[in-house]
Amino acid sequence: MMGFLGNAYLWVKAAHIIFVIFLMAGLFMMPRFFVYHQECAVGSDEDRKWIDREAKLRRIILNPSLVIVWIFGLMLMVNIGAWTMGWFHAKLLFVLALSGYHGWVVGYAKKLARGERTLSDKQLRLMNEVPGIAAAIIVVLAIVKPF
């Protein structure tokens, strides 16, 4: 595949996929952390440990991965002229939704750090399914290109 990336195209694509895997790992882990975090008393030593774990996951994995995924993804989009392809518009919609989910995850971690527990364990377990469903749809759109 040529374009402005030239021979670097496959390297950029590989990096994009690698960082998507990192991002997805973090998005799967965080709601599970929330379930366990909510079980401990607000202000306890265990509460502080979960706050620290969640902050590290955000700072070390989630936020950097999201930024890098977007940078490489935009590079790939421009390189292949994806904005003219129908499948890409659908994929972009789901990528934006997944990015919004990332924002929700970060926001809920901050709520838990303040001692707010607004969702049940069951709701958090259901929220844990969101990234898997989104990833499946995104992969099908990117690989199969159904339209």
Image (cartoon, grey):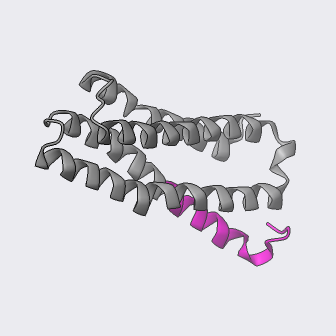
| Prevailing SS of the magenta stretch | helix
At horizontal 45% and vertical 32% (from top left) the residue drawn is: 130
* Observer able to see residue 140: no
The residue most toward the bottom is 7
Q: Does residue 5 sit above or below 66 in this rendering?
A: below
Where residue 67 sits, quadrant-wise, is bottom right
Q: Position of residue 60 (x, y in %)?
A: 41, 63
At horizontal 35% and vertical 26% (from top left) the residue drawn is: 126
At horizontal 21% and vertical 34% (from top left) the residue drawn is: 38
User: Along the line of sight, which residue is nearer the eye, 66 or 5?
Assistant: 66
* Placement of the N terminus among the 4 image quadrants: bottom right
Q: Position of residue 22 (x, y in %)?
A: 45, 58
Left or right for 46, reference 124: left
Q: Does residue 96 sit above or below 62 in this rendering?
A: above
Q: How many marks?
A: 0
Q: Which residues are magenta?
A: 1-20
User: Along the line of sight, which residue is nearer the eye, 59 or 94?
Assistant: 59
User: Along the line of sight, which residue is nearer the eye, 84 or 121?
Assistant: 121
Q: Is residue 3 magenta?
A: yes
At horizontal 42% and vertical 59% (from top left) the residue drawn is: 59
Left or right for 78, reference 131: right
Left or right for 3, reference 26: right
* Placement of the C terminus among the 4 image quadrants: top right
Q: Position of residue 57 (x, y in %)?
A: 36, 56
Q: Position of residue 102 (x, y in %)?
A: 50, 42
Where residue 6 sits, quadrant-wise, is bottom right
* Observer able to see residue 83: yes
